[in-house]
Amino acid sequence: MENAVTDGLRVLMMLHSPKRRAAEVARLASLIVKALGDAGRFRQWCSVIWAMIREENELRPAVEPFILQFQRILLDIREGAPWKKAGAVLMSRWKGTED
């Protein structure tokens, strides 16, 4: 699942069809929800992904920093991190990497 999210986010910027891009955003948001156990946050993750697309279009790196933090959070979860809201921790870490 981790690879599906990271690979999908990297490919997302190459999709130019609005329908294909929207379908991929929904698919990736669903995978992120499952990976983080973040039930009920599908729409939030869709918004986050659309924001990443906008930032990348404005030549501000967003996808790679997010991917790095996503991989880190999944590793923390596998190592037994006690968070109840891993998605909130991920967002905090990701937004903390911006300059």
Image (spheres, grey):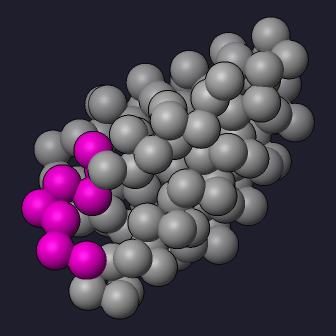
Residue 83 drawn in magenta: yes
| Residue name at image x 33 percent, y 77 percent | 77
In the image, is residue 29 above or below residue 37?
A: above
Residue 63 image position (x, y, % from top left): 70, 40
Q: Residue furthest top?
A: 58
Residue 35 image position (x, y, % from top left): 37, 68
In the image, is residue 87 above or below residue 50?
A: below
| Residue name at image x 40 percent, y 50 percent | 90
Residue 18 drawn in magenta: no
Is 82 placed left or right of 52 in the picture?
A: left
Q: Nearer the viewer, residue 72 or 30?
A: 72
Kindly indicate the quadrant of the structure image that contains residue 68: bottom right
Is 56 placed left or right of 80 in the picture?
A: right
Residue 96 visible in the current orientation? yes
In the image, is residue 89 above or below residue 52?
A: below
Residue 6 image position (x, y, % from top left): 67, 60
In which quadrant will I find the C terminus? top right
Kindly indicate the quadrant of the structure image that contains residue 91: top left
| Residue name at image x 87 percent, y 36 percent | 14
In the image, is residue 24 above or below residue 36?
A: above
Residue range in magenta is 81-88
Q: Residue furthest bottom?
A: 79
| Residue name at image x 68 percent, y 15 percent | 54
Name the chief secondary structure element in magenta. loop
Q: How many marks?
A: 0
Residue 29 visible in the current orientation? no
Q: Nearer the viewer, residue 37 or 21?
A: 37
